[in-house]
Image (cartoon, rainbow, N blue to C red):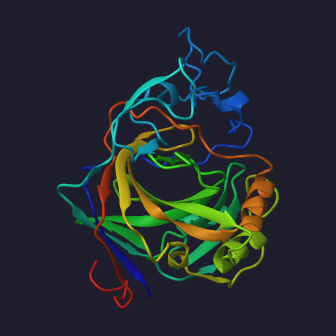
């Protein structure tokens, strides 16, 4: 079993609840739904602003939160004064350049192989080691059972892996002094972890697509078994092995860390983000297949950084030998 050992900055103790997924009819990722700046999901009653659409639900944090995700990761030698995804003068921002970490806690990814189940929504209470394929209506997702042993260790904190899902195109972007200066990737994979007290940590992996890359076999299995209907689980295809660690790039130059939020309603803040700089290489047809399942993009528009600093840790170690059952 592979274990990926990373030392990254501690973003403090977090405590928010991972809310239940909302129905596909409640919101979507179109500009008509989220707005040109990704805040229209809020629709704060009685507040005259650009978030004045007649939406059936209210997600205030999507508009008024100061630590929203995703963001532009600034690797230039200067402060970005305007959100790079939104032309001026709509959204002014103060996005300082990312800086090396000064203090670091260890981060260990201990993911275990699992076996697919046909339990559907009941997977959340299953004490065994199992997972299901799910089409949430907003993302292609793999959801794990309560008894799944995979986890993320941040210092002394333990975050069990709850689910992972895909966005096309990527949500975070990387801004550099080189061309192309503002690099969105074709996709982004989010591993969502939740502590017993509700604290959330998300590990993000960019998806770099090309027709010259080989098909990723794990992604191929996920695409083939995800139901085409929205808000649906697989009803068959049980007994299929899957190792989520195979979706993490073995080589990685550094990890970007910052304090953010969920990138979908209710946009809850208090989420620790860890975004790997090295993308996972996949065939371009696989990105198209992910996109075709939802029939639209499912990325949130980049949000203001509001002077948050992204920290960079360059000391990444990969331990291929350690057994994930050892220790905690």
- Residue 161 image offset from top left, x and y in percent: 46, 66
- Residue 261 image offset from top left, x and y in percent: 44, 42
Horizontal side, residue 323 vs residue 161: left or right:
left
Horizontal side, residue 240 vs residue 66: left or right:
right
Question: Relative to 194, is 38 above or below?
Answer: above
How many numbered callouts? 0
Question: Relative to 89, is 124 above or below?
Answer: below
For this orientation, the residue located farthest to the front is 178
Residue in the foreground of this view, choosing between 105 and 210: 210
Task: Tell me what residue is drawn at x 57 percent, y 25 percent.
Answer: 87
Q: Does residue 234 appear in the picture of this structure?
A: no
The quarter of the displayed image where residue 66 is located? top left
Task: Tell me what residue is drawn at x 78 percent, y 62 percent.
Answer: 289
Picture quarter with the C terminus: bottom left
Picture quarter with the N terminus: bottom left
- Residue 307 image offset from top left, x and y in percent: 32, 32
Task: Tell me what residue is drawn at x 65 percent, y 56 percent.
Answer: 186
Q: Does residue 268 appear in the picture of this structure?
A: yes
Residue in the foreground of this view, choosing between 90 and 115: 90
Horizontal side, residue 233 vs residue 275: left or right:
right
Question: Relative to 7, is 308 above or below?
Answer: above
Residue in the foreground of this view, choosing between 258 and 124: 258
Horizontal side, residue 327 vs residue 228: left or right:
left
For this orientation, the residue located farthest to the bottom is 321
- Residue 320 image offset from top left, x and y in percent: 39, 87
């Amino acid at each position: 079993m592979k274990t990926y050992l990373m030392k990254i900055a501690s973003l403090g103790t977090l405590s928010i609840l991972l809310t239940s997924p909302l129905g596909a009819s409640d919101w979507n990722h179109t500009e008509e739904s989220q707005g040109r700046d990704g805040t229209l999901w809020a629709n704060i009653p009685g507040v005259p602003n650009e978030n004045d659409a007649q939406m059936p639900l209210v997600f205030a944090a999507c508009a008024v939160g100061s630590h929203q995700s995703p963001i532009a990761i600034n690797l230039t030698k200067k402060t970005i004064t305007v959100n790079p995804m939104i032309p001026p003068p709509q959204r002014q921002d103060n996005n300082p350049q990312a800086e090396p970490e000064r203090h670091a806690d260890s981060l260990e990814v201990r993911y275990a192989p699992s076996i697919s189940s046909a339990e559907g929504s009941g997977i959340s209470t299953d004490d065994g080691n199992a997972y299901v394929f799910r089409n949430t209506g907003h993302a292609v997702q793999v959801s794990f059972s309560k008894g799944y042993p995979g986890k993320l260790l941040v210092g002394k904190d333990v975050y069990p892996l709850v689910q992972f899902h895909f966005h096309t195109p990527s949500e975070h972007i990387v801004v550099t002094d080189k061309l192309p200066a503002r690099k969105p990737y074709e996709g982004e994979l989010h591993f969502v972890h939740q502590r017993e007290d509700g604290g959330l940590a998300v590990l993000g992996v960019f998806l770099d697509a090309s027709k010259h890359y080989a098909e990723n076999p794990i992604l191929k299995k996920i695409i083939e078994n995800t139901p085409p209907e929205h808000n649906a689980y697989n009803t068959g295809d049980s007994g299929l092995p899957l190792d989520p660690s195979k979706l993490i790039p073995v080589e990685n130059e550094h990890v970007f860390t910052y304090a953010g939020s969920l990138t979908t309603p209710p946009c809850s803040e208090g989420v620790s983000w860890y975004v790997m700089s090295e993308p996972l290489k996949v065939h371009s047809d696989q990105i198209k297949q992910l996109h075709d399942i939802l029939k639209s993009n499912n990325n949130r528009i980049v949000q203001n950084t509001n002077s948050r600093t992204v920290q960079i840790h360059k000391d990444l170690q990969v331990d291929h030998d350690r057994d994930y059952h050892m220790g905690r």
